[in-house]
């Protein structure tokens, strides 16, 4: 009996103690997604075929003055100034297909739930994840995996504008707290969170299942200030919903605004003692959008050419400053979850996770 007990102890030690030791010095990670933002806007700015198209733009003069410049490099800087003025100097941007850098989904659905499942679990699941309906994800996300070890327990949180995220993360099984859709902050509220709760009820969203990104952002930021989670997921949604509405003007303004929100998250991490010089931010999208015919920019899905083309941005602690990657490469969305696991010092089981970690 004593030998059996010693064997159990040895198995426990080998399985869990190394993980604890490896993760103690791991960086803090903030994973951010911008729903349905095309690589074309990220890398070339406002689309010349859309920016003056009155079918999709309410005020073409205003939009041109705000976001149109003669070169793609100038256009992308006015659209997303933080990414192109600062992040491009300290991090790396993948997915500019005109330069040979490609990133693709491995799922064949090319819409949100399958895309987020692939990002968060490292493996497409077309057989089971084939709709956007609200059902608990049968797969295990990187958030759940980290929450299941000693170092990460209670140090994970997720925030999303879309009300399906509690199911994608499987909040019920994983134990990872998810604030999404029109949910209010509920625990240990500070004055700003109480105000956000009140304001969220008073400001109507244009959509029935997606709140405005400002609420998602500030709920996440306040939680980071109070609880200092080591792994945070923030999912902004406005770019996709304005695109579905056929409102290119609002789509560009949402992209521009999200750039400033990301900068606010980064600036906070560099001022906070817990996160300062010890944080990595990874940004990506759940799917692309159409380009040709022109009207396909509003949609995505398996029948829309180009909707499986995505991108990734990474910067922070020990991330190589590659800038805009121009060498021929082929990356996949299923590589994001194993990359996060590797950064956290956790094992990557290739039987469960299809993607291979990236060396950032």
Image (cartoon, rainbow, N blue to C red):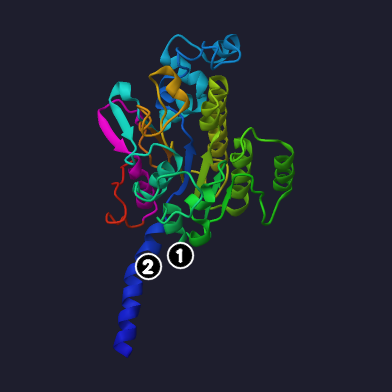
Residue furthest toward the left? 328
Q: Which residues are magenta?
A: 322-345
CB of mark 2 within 8 Å of CB of mark 1? yes
Residue at x 35% of width, y 49% of height: 125
Residue nearest the viewer, comparing 130 with 233 = 130
Q: Position of residue 280 (x, y in %)?
A: 44, 43
The C terminus is located in which quarter? top left
Asked if the stretch drawn in magenta spans residue 340, the answer is: yes
Label 2 sits on residue: 16
Label 1 sits on residue: 150
Q: Position of residue 50 (x, y in %)?
A: 48, 15
Q: Position of residue 189 (x, y in %)?
A: 70, 53
Which image quadrant for residue 106?
Answer: top left
Asked whether, in this view, residue 221 is left or right of residue 170, the answer is right
Q: Position of residue 207 (x, y in %)?
A: 61, 35
Q: Residues within 10 Å of mark 2 (few under 14, many from 20)?
A: few
Whether residue 230 is visible, yes or no, is no
The span from disc 2 to disc 1 (Cα, nearest Å) is 8 Å
């Amino acid at each position: 009996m004593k030998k059996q007990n010693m064997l159990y102890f040895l198995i426990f030690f080998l399985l869990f103690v190394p993980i604890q030791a490896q993760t103690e010095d791991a960086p803090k990670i903030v994973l951010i997604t911008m729903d349905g933002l095309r690589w074309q806007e990220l890398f070339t700015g406002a689309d010349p075929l859309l920016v003056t198209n009155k079918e999709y733009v309410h005020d073409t003069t205003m939009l041109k003055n705000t976001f149109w410049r003669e070169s793609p490099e100038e256009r992308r800087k006015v659209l997303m100034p933080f990414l192109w003025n600062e992040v491009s100097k300290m991090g790396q941007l993948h997915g500019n297909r005109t330069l040979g850098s490609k990133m693709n989904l491995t799922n064949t659905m090319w819409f949100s739930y399958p895309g987020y499942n692939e990002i968060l679990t490292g493996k497409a699941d077309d057989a089971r994840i084939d709709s956007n309906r609200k059902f608990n994800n049968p797969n295990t996300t990187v958030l759940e995996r980290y929450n299941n070890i000693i170092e990460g327990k209670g140090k994970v949180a997720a925030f999303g504008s879309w009300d399906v995220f509690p199911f994608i993360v499987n909040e019920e099984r994983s134990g990872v707290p998810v604030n999404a859709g029109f949910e209010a902050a509920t625990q240990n509220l500070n004055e700003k969170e109480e105000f956000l709760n009140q304001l969220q009820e008073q400001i109507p969203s244009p959509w029935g299942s997606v709140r405005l990104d400002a609420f998602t952002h500030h709920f996440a930021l306040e939680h980071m200030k109070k609880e200092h989670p080591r792994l945070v997921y923030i999912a902004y949604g406005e770019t996709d919903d304005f695109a579905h509405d056929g409102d290119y003007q609002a789509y560009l303004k949402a992209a521009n605004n999200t750039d400033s929100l990301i900068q606010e998250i980064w600036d906070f991490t560099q001022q906070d003692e817990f996160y300062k010089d010890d944080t990595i931010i990874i940004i990506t999208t759940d799917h692309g959008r159409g380009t040709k015919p022109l009207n396909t920019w509003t949609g995505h899905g398996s029948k829309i050419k180009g909707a499986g083309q995505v991108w990734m941005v990474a910067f922070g602690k020990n991330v190589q400053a590659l800038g805009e990657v121009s060498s021929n490469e082929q990356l996949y969305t299923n590589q994001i979850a194993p990359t996060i696991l590797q950064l956290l010092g956790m094992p990557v089981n290739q039987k469960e996770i299809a993607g291979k970690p990236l060396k950032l």
